[in-house]
Image: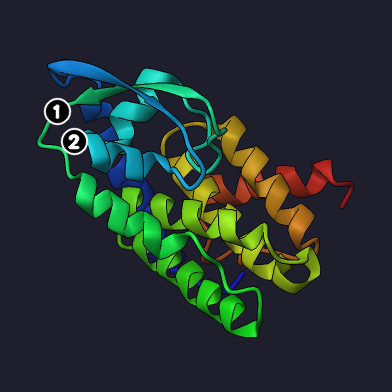
């Protein structure tokens, strides 16, 4: 698989594992608000709007995949800082209208590369937010035109899930990556052992 700096990601996954352990001991949020998911929402946009964080919203609502929110779902959002609804709305407008032509695919390819770079730099919330926006837009294209991009963006989620210790969700993301691009493979030298082991399991599940 190209585009991933796996040695940097190995360090990044260790950093995330330590960060996740620290969240458990955080003080409880002061108050909560209820949010009903609308078209175009992502966990990051919702958290930004109300002055929360992705980690807190995910934990409070037991969200299994931040890239898949259902319109109409009610979320309980912890408020821990000053809301920034103007920034959230500006960001929402920036990802709502995919270009259905080749230029749109090229733009999404750049966003996929950005998500991979954010992940390699241990900017996990940013990587997942970018992945969330890209995943929704890729769905507007024929799968054959964006298969490689779909597989790469699923792997961004898979690596974060490995780092968080959620092997089941990581495996599911890898299986979706292989469904999009059955020829996808990882470099056994560059890939962190746990990521590679799960990926081989995903391949075996497909009968490879």
- Against 204, residue 167 (above or below) is above
Colour logic: rainbow
User: For this view, does 149 lie left or right of residue 206?
Assistant: left
Quarter of the figure with the N terminus: bottom right
For image coordinates 35% across by 62% down, the residue present is 118
Q: Which residue is mark 2?
A: 51
Of residues 203 and 67, the one nearer the viewer is 67
Question: Picture coordinates of residue 201 (x, y %)?
Answer: 72, 42
Of residues 117 and 111, the one nearer the viewer is 111
- Against 98, residue 58 (above or below) is above
For image coordinates 48% across by 37% down, the residue present is 38
- Against 185, residue 173 (above or below) is above
User: For this view, does 203 lie left or right of residue 28?
Assistant: right
Kindly give the residue lying farthest to the right in the view shown: 207
Is the residue marked by circle 2 packed among few (<14), some (14-19), or many (20+) residues within 10 Å?
some
Question: Picture coordinates of residue 48 (x, y %)?
Answer: 25, 43
The image quarter containing residue 41 is top left
Q: Which residue is mark 1?
A: 80
Is the residue marked by circle 1 packed among few (<14), some (14-19), or many (20+) residues within 10 Å?
some
Question: Picture coordinates of residue 127 (x, y %)?
Answer: 39, 55
| Mark 1–mark 2 distance (CA, rounded to whole Å) | 6 Å
Of residues 62 and 69, the one nearer the viewer is 69
Q: Secondary structure at mark 2?
A: loop
Label of residue 149 in the image: none
Earlier sequence position, callout 1 versus callout 2: 2
User: For this view, does 86 lie left or right of residue 96?
Assistant: left
Question: Picture coordinates of residue 35 (x, y %)?
Answer: 37, 26
Of residues 6 and 119, the one nearer the viewer is 119
Q: Is residue 11 visible?
A: no
For image coordinates 52% across by 65% down, the residue present is 97
Contact between labelled residues 2 and 1, with CB atoms less than 8 Å apart: yes
């Amino acid at each position: 698989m190209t585009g991933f700096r796996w040695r940097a990601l190995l360090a990044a996954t260790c950093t995330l594992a330590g960060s996740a352990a620290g969240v458990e001991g955080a003080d409880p949020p002061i108050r909560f608000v209820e949010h009903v998911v609308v078209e175009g929402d992502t966990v990051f946009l919702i958290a930004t709007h109300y002055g929360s964080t992705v980690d807190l919203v995910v934990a409070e609502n037991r969200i299994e995949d931040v890239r898949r929110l259902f319109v109409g779902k009610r979320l309980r959002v912890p408020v821990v800082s000053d809301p920034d609804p103007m920034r959230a709305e500006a960001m929402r407008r920036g990802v709502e209208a995919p270009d259905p032509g080749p230029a749109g695919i090229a733009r999404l390819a750049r966003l996929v590369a950005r998500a991979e770079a954010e992940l390699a730099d241990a900017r996990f919330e940013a990587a997942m937010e970018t992945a969330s926006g890209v995943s929704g837009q890729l769905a507007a294209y024929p799968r054959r035109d964006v298969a490689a991009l779909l597989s790469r963006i699923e792997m961004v989620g898979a690596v974060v899930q490995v780092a968080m210790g959620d092997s089941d969700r990581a495996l599911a993301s890898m299986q979706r990556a292989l469904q999009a691009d059955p020829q996808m493979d990882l470099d056994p030298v560059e890939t962190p052992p746990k990521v590679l082991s799960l990926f081989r399991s995903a391949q075996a599940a497909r009968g490879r």
